[in-house]
Image (cartoon, rainbow, N blue to C red):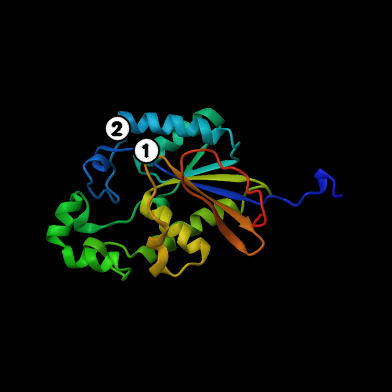
Amino acid sequence: MTAPADRKSRGRRVILWRHGQTSWNVERRFQGTTDVELTETGVGQARRAARLLASLQPDAIVASDLRRAANTAAELAALTGLEVAHDEGLRETYAGVWQGLTHDEIIARHGEEYAAWKRGEPVRRGGGELESEVADRAAPVVLRHAEKLPEDGTLVVVSHGGTIRTTIGRLLGLDAHHWESLGGLSNCCWSVLGQGARGWRLLEHNAGTLPEPVLGDDD
């Protein structure tokens, strides 16, 4: 029988955490790179989630420099004593003229463009960034900080829904056409990636509770 001390390493872990609620989230306005502040509800969401994530004893925190992400990250930093590294590479997708429009306004004014994007076609929404370009800037930030972790270390990345989805897709090696299949993240929920023998794999998605160990034949 193998002694517990000889168990294989769990490997590095990356927690991708979406920011708390903003007024534009409630109004269903496309935020993009617009620097919208958290609502009172959003601050409360961040504090609750931070208490859970702090129990995972993260080794490092990196966040988008937009206030909704930076202030969400600050709640975790206050509990853990870690400094937050801010990186504009983790900002939300720049979406040009879509930014500030509600969901209904986007469909009314840019319906064909919206439909093409939902079909998985490479679209510069509002004249902004392609999803692949978002992944090009965000995924390297995550990898750079993950590489600094100890062997079993945990990195918390505080970012935005679209950026997190494209980053997960890139790190999992999925074709960009299939990134939408990952689904969105609710405010202040997170996804967990674990580093395995064949690269990164998705362990949790759109979670709001602490990860449970996988017990069974797929472990």
Q: Is residue 77 visible?
A: no
Q: Quadrant of the C terminus?
A: bottom right
Task: Determine the secondary structure under disc 1.
Answer: loop
The answer to whether 157 appears left or right of 35 in the picture is right
Task: Determine the secondary structure under disc 2.
Answer: loop
**Is label 2 in contact with label 1 (beta carbons under 8 Å)?**
yes
**Residue located at (63% from left, 65% from top):** 198
Kindly report the distance in space between the C-alpha atoms of the residues bearing marks 2 and 1.
8 Å
Return the residue nearer the eye: 77 or 152: 152
Give the number of the disc on residue 195.
Answer: none
* 2 is higher (above) or lower (below) than 124: above
Counting labels gives: 2
The answer to whether 100 appears left or right of 19 in the picture is left
Mark 2 sits on what residue?
Answer: 39
Q: Residue 16: image x %, image y %?
A: 48, 48
If you read the primary sequence from the N terminus, does the residue marked by circle 2 or circle 1 appear first? Answer: 1
Q: Residues within 10 Å of mark 2 (few under 14, many from 20)?
A: some
Q: Residue 147: image x %, image y %?
A: 61, 54
Farthest-out residue, left: 108
Mark 1 sits on what residue?
Answer: 20
Q: Is residue 85 visible?
A: yes
Q: Residues within 10 Å of mark 1 (few under 14, many from 20)?
A: many
